[in-house]
Amino acid sequence: MRIVLLIVLVCCSTLLTSAQELQLTKGRVLEDLALQDSVGSRMLLYLPTNFDVARKWPVLFLTTQEGSASQSLRFMAGAAEREGYILAANAALLDTLPLTQKVLYVAGSLDKLKEILPVDTRQIYVGGLRANAELAQILPSLVQGIRGVLALSSAPPNPELLSLRSSFHYVGVVHRGDHHYLPTVASEISLREKRIPYYLRYFESDLELPGEDLIAESLAVLRVMAMKGGHIAQDSAYIRKTYERVLTQVSVEQKQEAFIVSEALADMGGELFDDLLPTTGLNAARTAVRRSDGFRSQRRELRNLKLKEQILSDDFVYYLEEDILRFNLDNLGWWRYQIQAIEGFKKSDEHEERLMGKRLHSYIDALIEDYETLAFAAKPVDEDALILLGMLRTLSHPTASEGYLRVISLTSKYNDYGTALFYLEELLKTGYRDKQKLYDLEHTALLRIGPEFNALIEKYLNDPRYEVPENPDEGGFWPGY
């Protein structure tokens, strides 16, 4: 049965007073709210199933990219339900907007939330997933009333953008196989210097993104930080419950041989709960982990690999920039070798070497995405760069179709049909089956009526759209092919 909440929204101005009635469903992501202003009309909400207008509620506003607002709220909804948070986002936060406009949208959205919902203004938080968190991290310095930031699988805050006058709590969650891991560890220094209370949570699951349990833990930590900071009244039962959750997880991580995660969690938990309750259990757990052979071995291995990882990362930055500037396709063999080496690291018998391999792979993917963003933003679009980056995508993720399709399309645009056919066959070898998409691919009108194209379709997918001659390879269809 649908649980429907009727909220009376009173909009006041100096000239008139009017009332709107909103019909909001609890326990699901709400889009297309019946709000007529430019900010409210693009907002999305999630209200917990136990939502009640009789009490104040904490809010987590998610900064999102175009088209990802609904998906982000759904990703966070389970944890928000468990911890009693309102979730909100605004689909008007487009990547193409200048920072000032984004800040105005966030500030306007938070003001609108306070108008229509019983928001606890002492617990207004912003957060984001991956690159979306970068905006969230600077908002406390730009928008008044934001008490904390939740950054998931994201780079740490830029210390140059953090103000000593900013009073907010920071919770960062990152996989140890994410290329953001080592910078996040290093960020503790700047966070301490800026006197920003922080809680950095690492994990090593098979999934690259944090699961519901970990997100719920992070939301609980934000509430405990608010209690410790004196923003809300202390709830001893809630503090004890969260403490026991963290203590249990320290043991779980140790049993799963994630010793560095276990030690860091015990350390962070000890700082969080200090002055709130006795932390004897966490202190003892941290000591036990540090004395274990597994922790010492992983820590030693990590220290030994840091320099190697840094050198490789620097090489990737240097050579990718050079290859793009020169449109150097001759260096693809070097990239193939590097990615093969990374795959070897990921299969290593050594725990930390496997994680290093994941971080390096993650870093290459991030570099590709960053340069693609620059190429698309260039005037005109830098299609040479997009071709090279598409080729790198096929090396980094050989079973994903995106890189192949882009290379086929753009090389066809410039009549490089030999390259287009090569990448077409490599794509078909992966098991790609979407024949319609291949025939609809932009810039391939001449390519797809040729005998070589249709011969490949017949070989791998059967039933080509155009007739294939008996000897399609004799002579070639295009001059110079």
Image (spheres, helix red, strand yellow):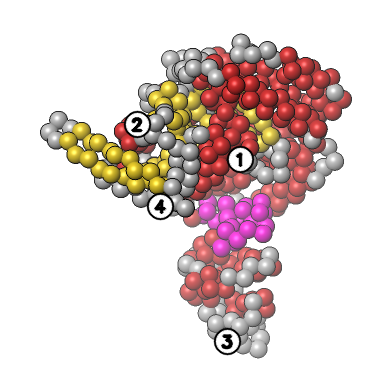
Find residue 369 and report its horizontal and vertical position in percent. 55, 46
252 relative position to 200: left or right: right
Q: Which label belongs to residue 212?
A: 1
Q: Earlier in the sequence, mark 4 or mark 1?
A: 1
Q: Amino acid at mark 4?
A: Pro
Query: How far is mark 3 from mark 1, CA to CA?
Result: 53 Å
From mark 4 to mark 1, how far is it between C-alphas? 42 Å
Q: Which residue is mark 4?
A: 380
- Measured as percent of width and height from the top left, residue 458 is found at 64, 80
Q: Earlier in the sequence, mark 3 or mark 4?
A: 4
Alpha-carbon neighbours of circle 3 within 10 Å: few (<14), some, or many (≥20)? few
- The residue under label 2 is 114
Q: Which residue is mark 3?
A: 467
Q: How many marks?
A: 4
Q: Is residue 286 above or below residue 470?
A: above
Dot 2 amino acid type: Lys
Location of residue 473 (image quadrant): bottom right
Q: Identify the magenta region.
A: 384-405
Q: Nearer the viewer, residue 392 or 270?
A: 270
